[in-house]
Image (spheres, rainbow, N blue to C red):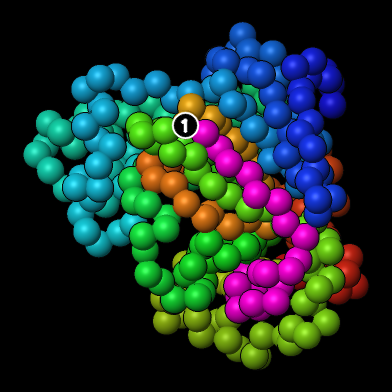
Amino acid sequence: MSAAPAAANTPDPGAAGLDVVREFADASWREDGPTRGVERVVESGRVLVFPRLAFALADAEKRFLDPRWTDGKTKNISVRWPSGELRGAAGAAADLQALRAMIVRYAEQSEAFALRLFPHYRGRLRRGNTSFRPFDVAGRVRSWRQDDTRMHVDAFPSNPMQGTRLLRVFNNINPNGEPRRWRVGEPFEAHARRYLGTIGKPLPGSAWLLQMSGITKRRRTEYDHLMLQLHDRAKADATFQATSPQLGVDFAPGTTWVCYSDQVLHGALGGAHLMEQTFLLDVDDLQQPQTSPLRTLERLAKRRLR
Ligand SMILES: [Fe+2]
């Protein structure tokens, strides 16, 4: 770390002995905030929490804190990059333009903030989707695989990451005082060791078939296969969910938090009205590539997984 964050506060790791959360006092998204050069903290699997860093909404934007703006087909309203297209929303053109502007502002503030926190990533961090999630986590009935209240690392069947990192900047914009309630779990390497020995190799030709038939956007590598299996095994394992080391973390409205969601074991237990910005980063652009899920899995499997 180039500059130790003077305002850092490390909360009690909790009964499970998990040391996952780091708190910082920043109250600005811009260059003038105190915390910078904390790549190693986030890369080591910590959740960086900023309880004083709110995403301010204009009075006219508060009407968007309502699920009625969704188009009913998707769980999120999002802006896709690089096109800047708004997806998942329904309404009059002027309203949608204002809603899009709110989400774009979150993208821009998050990006400036991420580049201050992680200056080493400048020129390498790529902007992924920006999403606004108005729905309540607790209210949705879903299959076990889609049930994000169960702890998991992020991995997507149709969107193979091929080792690329998923860095996410979240903000709770709930207007009713409700926290976003997470639980976080064991370190990634311990988690990988828990299941790796029982996961077989993908069927020969399956990656090609998935890509050719349009099920995956690009080739599903062996890394993606393992990450999906870790995601599914964890969610399907009731004993793991109930008894593994875990820590509840409540993010009050006005809180920003940042983590690598492909590395931090997390489940979202409750809350509605969340902003989220995804950034993508190649493993070799990390300050400590050996901490990444790709390098960790390669070390444990004793072979290349690309
Ligand atoms: Fe997730």
Q: Amino acid at mark 1?
A: Pro
In the rendered view of the protein, which quadrant contains the N terminus? top right
Residue beneath the point at 83% across and 82% down: 197
Is the residue indicated by label 1 positioned so its CB lies within 8 Å of ligand 1? Answer: no
The residue carrying pointer 1 sits among few (fewer than 14), some (14 to 19) or many (20 or more) residues within 10 Å by Cα, namely many
State whether residue 165 is above or below residue 219.
Answer: above
Name, please, the residue furthest toward the front: 15
Foreground of the two, 74 or 282: 74
Residue beneath the point at 46% across and 80% down: 212
Q: Is 47 covered by the magenta stretch?
A: no
Which quadrant would residue 98 be assigned to in this image?
top left
- The residue identified by callout 1 is 253
Would residue 304 be found to the left or right of residue 146 on screen?
right
Q: Position of residue 22 (x, y in %)?
A: 74, 33
Name, please, the residue furthest toward the top: 32
Q: Is 243 covered by the magenta stretch?
A: yes
* Helix, strand or loop for disc 1: loop
Residue beneath the point at 55% across and 82% down: 208
Marker count (numbered): 1
Foreground of the two, 126 or 118: 118
In the rendered view of the protein, which quadrant contains the C terminus? bottom right
Q: Position of residue 47 (x, y in %)?
A: 69, 41
Where does the magenta region start and end? Answer: 231-252
Q: Position of residue 52 (x, y in %)?
A: 57, 21
Residue beneath the point at 37% across and 69% down: 141
Q: Is residue 89 visible?
A: no
